[in-house]
Amino acid sequence: EAGVTQFPSHSVIEKGQTVTLRCDPISGHDNLYWYRRVMGKEIKFLLHFVKESKQDESGMPNNRFLAERTGGTYSTLKVQPAELEDSGVYFCASSGMRAGRAFFGQGTRLTVV
Amino acid sequence: GNSVTQMEGPVTLSEEAFLTINCTYTATGYPSLFWYVQYPGEGLQLLLKATKADDKGSNKGFEATYRKETTSFHLEKGSVQVSDSAVYFCALSDREGGTSYGKLTFGQGTILTVHP
């Protein structure tokens, strides 16, 4: 069974550009989460989808971040325009409705220069 | 709100040494507690978990006991190996109506390096 897959693994963009991160959850997992780790600090929750609906987006830092999950399968996280402080590692995780744990992807390392 | 505090690293040990990484938490309600590990070049993996007071989670020689009275979940291993070198994250999850446990609050992570 394939795990959670994230694309790209690394991205380097200039300040002001747009970047789109993608997450493919484990097949059949209704719950999908985005997290971010900035500058070696704690990993912070961004948002939670249940199928295609945003269940909780309390962790989204500002309106430059837009997450979508059309059809309840894969999800994208767009940053537009990117700022220097957006640099970090973005993790995606998924879980089933009865799971006692979440499964994480390898993360996307975003560097804004 | 919820928070997790881990001992600051990095931690450097010799092979076969005893490991303790301290973790304390603040939470409303009755959280589940986790240790995740990130090996170099890989994603986060669940190492162990505990869902109620006095439960002991264990895996790969690592152990942690859910201590409600001290709000702690310290990670221990009796004899570390070079292959244990990684970043370790303590985390908690509020019970949300008994459904998913995916929304996690993490500590800042502790880098462990084990030398031969």
Image: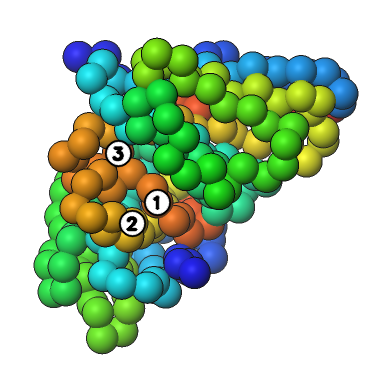
Distance (Cα) linking label 2 and label 1: 5 Å
> Which mark, by number, is residue A102?
3
* Amino acid bearing label 1: Leu
Of the numbered discs 2 and 1, the one sitting upstream in the chain is 2
Circles 3, 1 touching at the beta carbon (< 8 Å): yes
The C terminus of chain B lies in quadrant: top left
> Which mark, by number, is residue B93?
2
Label 3 and label 1 in one chain? no
Q: What element carries label 3?
A: loop
Q: Residue furthest front?
A: A53
* Residue B62 picture location, percent across and down: 21, 55
Circles 2, 1 touching at the beta carbon (< 8 Å): yes
User: Label 2 lies in what chain?
Assistant: B
Camera-nearest residue between B38 and B18: B38
* Amino acid bearing label 2: Ser
In the image, residue A99 sits, relative to residue A12, either above or below, namely below
Mark 2 crowdedness (10 Å alpha carbons): few <14, some 14-19, many ≥20: many
* Residue A39 picture location, percent across and down: 67, 46
Q: Residue at x 76, y 24 (%)?
A: A80
User: Label 1 lies in what chain?
Assistant: B
Q: Residue at x 73, y 36 (%)?
A: A63
> Which mark, by number, is residue B104?
1
Camera-nearest residue between A79 and B15: A79
User: Label 3 lies in what chain?
Assistant: A
